[in-house]
Amino acid sequence: MLPVHPDIVPVQLRADGVVRVGNTRVTLDTVVFAFNQGATAEEIVQQYPALRLADVYGAIAYYLHYRDEVDAYLAQRQQQIEQIRRETEARFDPVGIRERLLARKTAQE
């Protein structure tokens, strides 16, 4: 007889507050974004070889099962990312960055 196993949750909430897939550094955000862009689980694994195919399928199933909660989490993450971007740009002016980097490179040569 085939044993029935309890669901294995392929996502983990890490101490930094970010949900990652399997035992990798790949975020749930990344997998869901790729899936919503039309990528298959196999294509996602090709793009992120640290992932296991079973974990990607499981992450997609988790997303589909808990879509409202995951979408709320992703919206919160997007807000955090925007806040970090604003803070970084306030500390390090992005205007003229290319020219400054090229000047630094020329000075080193």
Image: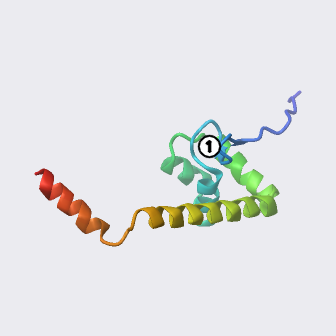
Occupied quadrant, residue 72: bottom right
The residue lying toward the viewer, choosing from 20 and 31, is 20
Q: How many marks?
A: 1
Q: Residue at x 81, y 56 (%)?
A: 65
The residue lying toward the viewer, choosing from 107 and 70, is 107
Occupied quadrant, residue 99: bottom left
Q: Position of residue 68 (x, y in %)?
A: 80, 63
Residue reaching furthest to the front: 91
Q: From the viewer's perspective, is residue 94 above or below residue 47?
A: below
In the displayed structure, does residue 46 sit left or right of residue 80? Answer: left
Q: Position of residue 16 (x, y in %)?
A: 65, 44
Q: From the viewer's perspective, is residue 87 above or below residue 17?
A: below
| Element on which disc 1 rests | helix
Occupied quadrant, residue 14: top right
Task: Confirm whether residue 38 shows in the render.
Answer: no
Which image quadrant: the N terminus? top right
Where does label 1 land, which residue? 53
Q: Residue at x 72, y 46 (%)?
A: 58
Q: Position of residue 67 (x, y in %)?
A: 78, 61
Q: Amino acid at mark 1?
A: Leu
Q: Position of residue 26 (x, y in %)?
A: 57, 46
Task: Confirm whether residue 69 shows in the render.
Answer: yes
Q: Residue at x 13, y 55 (%)?
A: 107
In the displayed structure, does residue 23 sit left or right of residue 71? Answer: left
The residue lying toward the viewer, choosing from 54 and 10, is 10
Q: From the viewer's perspective, is residue 37 above or below residue 30?
A: below
The residue lying toward the viewer, choosing from 54 and 15, is 15
In the displayed structure, does residue 19 sit left or right of residue 30? Answer: right
